[in-house]
Amino acid sequence: MTLNGKQILLIVSGGIAAYKAAVLVRRLKEAGASVVPVLTKGGAQFITPLTLSALAENPVYEDLFSLKDEAEMGHIRLAREADLILVAPISADLIGKMANGLADDLASTTVLAADGPVAIAPSMNPVMWANPATQANVATLMQRGVHVWGPADGDMACGEMGTGRFEEPEDLVARAEAFFAPKPLAGKTALVTSGPTHEPLDPVRVMANRSSGQQGQAIARALSAAGADVTLITGPVSLPEPFGVRTVRVETADEMLAATQRALPADIAVFAAAVADWKPKTTASEKLKKTANEAEMSVSFTKNPDILATIASAENRPALVVGFAAETENVVENARAKLSRKRADWILANNVSQGAVFGEDSNTVTLVSAKGTEPWPKLTKDQVAARLVQRVAETLT
Ligand code: CTP
């Protein structure tokens, strides 16, 4: 995903979250966008024009009646040249102005003159956000097609808790990327399994593996950005829940299978989870204690259900079933055997002979299907996800 070639007019209004606009500018630029900042008088109380301008590598526009600003670029041109106007953070005051068509400064005049997409990322005290006046203004803006990104829940800088927190800059970039991304999978549903499973031995111990969940989450994000309605079923991971994706957290393979079955019907299913093949035969209800004269202990295991194989043979089987295979030798033959044994349509075979994949940022895979094999170069997990989604879109649309 990328914002390459996109021009974003970033209006920063007053509020403590304005300091986060600096990070937002950085992240937008890292994603490939060019950023033209506009700073309101209120915003300038919290962040300096110099900071924004240095990070954006563009001048900051502040004053409606500045001869210099107007000579360089009038508010009409500012509004029209942007691919997206993002007001982040937006205060309750500026929301009110926008809803009522007021235009008494450069920011409000620019959004009134806009004829393209506008998104706002509110940030304010939870009581101000919940106030019926604010809610009515936001509803008006939404009716007019303004995209409302956030606010999030959580601790506020003002010391209160609730809804009103500025969306994290990374999430706003994800929203902007999703906004611009083509939507070849609109109307399709997808499920993705991801992460490890934890199989309990007793109330405090589990059998686990080192899967980080990164590849599965990257796939869930990419499917969602392509317009699919995505359910991510994840074992225990330390990653934040991806934006815009329905996330179901599970612990064991049995729970993962049940959650996956509940997520059917789906058009696309990608099984990226590192499911434990075995679980302890019994789970002790109390913590297992060691005794002084025992030098060894043994545990009996029983087989876990194969989630991929179960879903691929189900009556309501998704149209496209994709699995992974971790192989150290005979990568293609082993993947092909897995393809037919599990009845998957595609297997992404990971060559893990060169070292660890778990927790790494990159992955070297070969796409194996009934049609043949396609070795992919070493790619980041995001690039693997993007390429997979591209193939999915070509196949299903
Ligand atoms: N899988 C699953 N449920 C299991 C085991 C695996 O859904 N109980 C899925 C994984 O999510 C992955 C594929 O099946 O898509 C991997 O199959 P697996 O047989 O475990 O392959 P490897 O991990 O490569 O292990 P092995 O070669 O030892 O069979």
Image: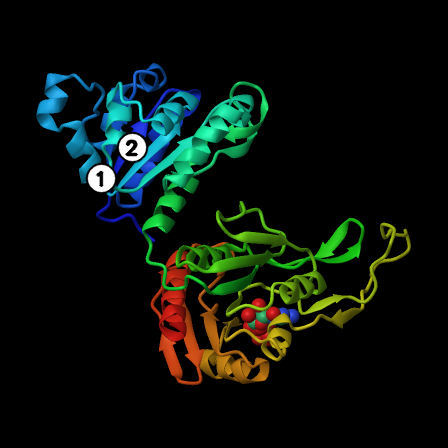
**Which numbered dot is residue 82?**
1
Residue drawn 19% across the image and 38% down it: 80
Residue drawn 38% across the image and 69% down it: 393
Position of residue 226 in the picture relative to residue 198 (left or right): left
Q: Which image quarter holds the C terminus?
A: bottom left
Q: Position of residue 358 (x, y in %)?
A: 52, 58
Residue drawn 35% across the image and 70% down it: 376
> CB of residue at label 2: within 8 Å of ligand 1?
no
> CB of residue at label 1: within 8 Å of ligand 1?
no
Q: Where is residue 46 in the image (x, y as percent from the top left)?
A: 36, 17
Seen in the picture, residue 388 relative to 232 is either above or below; the reply is below
Seen in the picture, residue 163 relative to 40 is either above or below; the reply is below
Q: Earlier in the sequence, mark 2 or mark 1?
A: 2
Give the structural element (helix, strand or loop) at label 2: strand
**Which numbered dot is residue 322?**
none
Residue found farthest to the left: 71
Position of residue 376 in the picture relative to residue 166 (left or right): left
Q: Position of residue 377 (x, y in %)?
A: 33, 67
Camera-side residue of 326 and 96: 96
- Would you name the residue on which mark 2 appears? 10
Q: Tag count in the figure?
A: 2
Q: Is residue 251 visible?
A: yes
Residue drawn 48% across the image and 30% down it: 136
Residue 234's quadrant in the figure? bottom right
Disc 2 to disc 1, C-alpha distance: 9 Å
Give the structural element (helix, strand or loop) at label 1: loop
Q: Is residue 19 visible?
A: no
Q: Where is residue 33 in the image (x, y as percent from the top left)?
A: 26, 43
Position of residue 362 in the picture relative to residue 233 (left or right): left
Query: What amino acid is found at the position of numbered circle 2 in the picture?
Result: Leu
Query: Quick one: label 2, few (<14), some, or many (20+) residues within 10 Å?
Result: many
- For ligand 1, give the image quadrant: bottom right
